[in-house]
Amino acid sequence: MKHLLGSIALCTILLGAVPVTAHKAKDSGPVTALHGGQALTAGPYHLELVATDGELTLYVTDHSDTSITTDGARAKATIQHGTEKARTQVDLEPSGENMLKGTGTFTINPDTGIIVFIKLPEQEAHAARFTPRQTKGGSAHTDGKPHQRKAPAH
């Protein structure tokens, strides 16, 4: 009995040390922005946000930059300027093969932060935090959680 408990404990320790990953990106390099926006990784997706005053367009691809259909997807963007408490919510609706779009009354400034939450049918929800005017073609990696990017050093 003592030998059996020792074996179980050893197996538990060894199995606990093995990393478990449901998905691994093909590389850990920067995400390429193909449409002139800021691109981030969120879980199994590459998300590229093109943000202009009054309009948001979100492109969804996998880690191989293959389009992922957005039919039936639900997404919401929360826009905030700097440390202001006021926030603007924008619903993003499927529009085209791998796009979601939303419009509203808002501006995009250098201090604008946009958190996008996306849920594709029969998939887990993921989120990414964009700073569209602070970076070009960004390369932040969110792993599905909101991520605060530091301002670039001058």
Image (cartoon, helix red, strand yellow):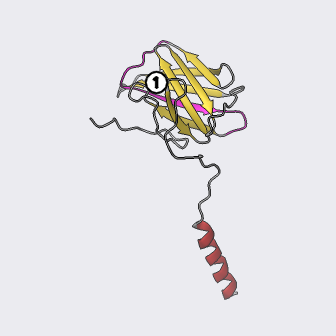
- Residue shown at 69%/83% (left/top)? 4
On-image quarter of the N terminus? bottom right
Residue 5, image quadrant: bottom right
Residue 138, image quadrant: top left
Q: Secondary structure at mark 1?
A: strand
- 28 displayed left or right of 123: left
- 66 displayed left or right of 31: right
Between 84 and 141, which is closer to the camera in this rendering? 141
Between 21 and 122, which is closer to the camera in this rendering? 21
**What residue is disc 1 on?**
79
Name, please, the residue furthest toward the left.
154
Is residue 106 inside the magenta stretch?
Answer: yes
- 25 displayed left or right of 112: right
Q: What's the magenta region?
A: 105-123
- Residue shown at 60%/72% (left/top)? 14
x and y percentages locating residue 114 in the rendered image: 47, 27
Q: How many marks?
A: 1
On-image quarter of the C terminus? top left
Neighbourhood count class around disc 1 (C-alpha, 10 Å): few under 14, some 14–19, many 20 upward: many
x and y percentages locating residue 41 in the rendered image: 54, 39
Tag 1: amino acid: Ile
- Residue shown at 54%/24% (left/top)? 35
x and y percentages locating residue 112 in the rendered image: 40, 25
